[in-house]
Amino acid sequence: MLKQPVVEITGLSKKLKSIQAVDGLNMCVYENDIYGFLGPNGSGKSTTIRMMTSLLSSDSGSLNIFGKPLNKNRNQILGKIGAFIEKPDFYEYLTAYKNLELLCKYSGQPAIPGKINKILESVGLLDRAHSKVKSFSKGMKQRLGIGQALLNDPDLLILDEPTSGLDPAGVKDIRDLISSLNREMGKTIILSSHQLQDIEMIANRMCIISKGKQVVEGYVEDLLMQQSYFTIFEVDQVYKSIEVLEKSKLRIKLIEKDESQIKVVCKKGIIPEINKILVNNRIAVKSIGTKQNLEDYFLTLT
């Protein structure tokens, strides 16, 4: 079944003072995507997200959400979007429950106890519902921020750097939560992140932008399959292996070595050729390990 577009951006541009922050950007997010939105600092990600949430207006181009122009259907569209932008702010002296209750009232929604408890449960905070937010770790505040974005039961969640500043355990918790919201609650999610591992592990589609323009967009797996692999060869003669490969005409990049292995970036089809050259030069290859390397791909493109 063909998925319907949730967000369609065509030729979107925005100038901030003398800087062209977004420059003819194109992207498309489909229903039930976890859509990774990647780009270096200053690439235009935050400006784009602010335009998606109507915090900024565009200079030109079109921005359609749920099949309708945002500028002509603002209230209707925003009622179906939940957003987590930068860091969440809460009343520290109030409990998690009270904060969400107040946010419901501010936005004109009924503060139904069962609804608030269900949201706290979905973000893993039900057992701390009546604890003051000032006692929360940063990871718990991030989860409460996502809970706040779920108050209107949105069809589209826009999360801007939700794992920023968290320790590895906190990052994993947020990744698991995002996957669960997508898989179990059917939310379409736009995930803006500098954590490339987040995108590689949980996003199904992604867009990389640089200087406000789209560099590439597509399915994460397909894009990585077209690109280089991070490959580890465990060998019995490291220095001889390096010498042999440097003399070969293969297009590879040696990135690291230690006493028992060499690490290279190469196309998938070259891996058997590397192995053949090593074996023909009487170098014992004990194992070969490959990993699709989003970081190298990202750096190459941007």
Image: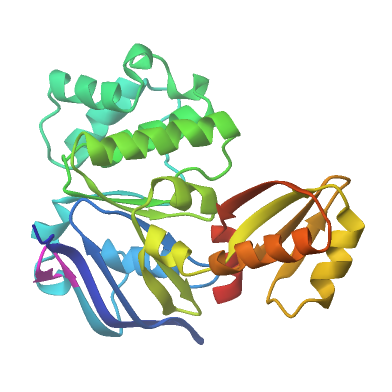
**Is 84 covered by the magenta stretch?**
no
Q: Is residue 22 above or below residue 260?
A: below
From the top left corner, tell me how far across and down residue 130 is, in percent: 35, 13
Q: Quadrant of the C terminus?
A: bottom right
The residue sitting at 46% across, 51% down in the picture is: 200
The residue sitting at 10% across, 31% down in the picture is: 110
- Is residue 302 visible in the rendered image? The answer is no
- 257 on left or right of 253: right
Q: Is residue 116 above or below residue 253?
A: above
Q: In front here: 71 or 62? A: 62
Q: Main secondary structure of the magenta part?
A: strand
Q: Which residues are magenta?
A: 64-69
Q: Is residue 16 above or below residue 292?
A: below
The residue sitting at 12% across, 37% down in the picture is: 109
From the top left corner, tell me how far across and down residue 19 is, in percent: 51, 84
- Is residue 260 visible in the rendered image? The answer is yes
- 203 on left or right of 19: left
From the top left corner, tell me how far across and down residue 231 is, in percent: 65, 56
- 268 on left or right of 13: right
- 275 on left or right of 129: right
Specify the quadrant of the image occupied by residue 272: bottom right
Specify the quadrant of the image occupied by residue 216: bottom left
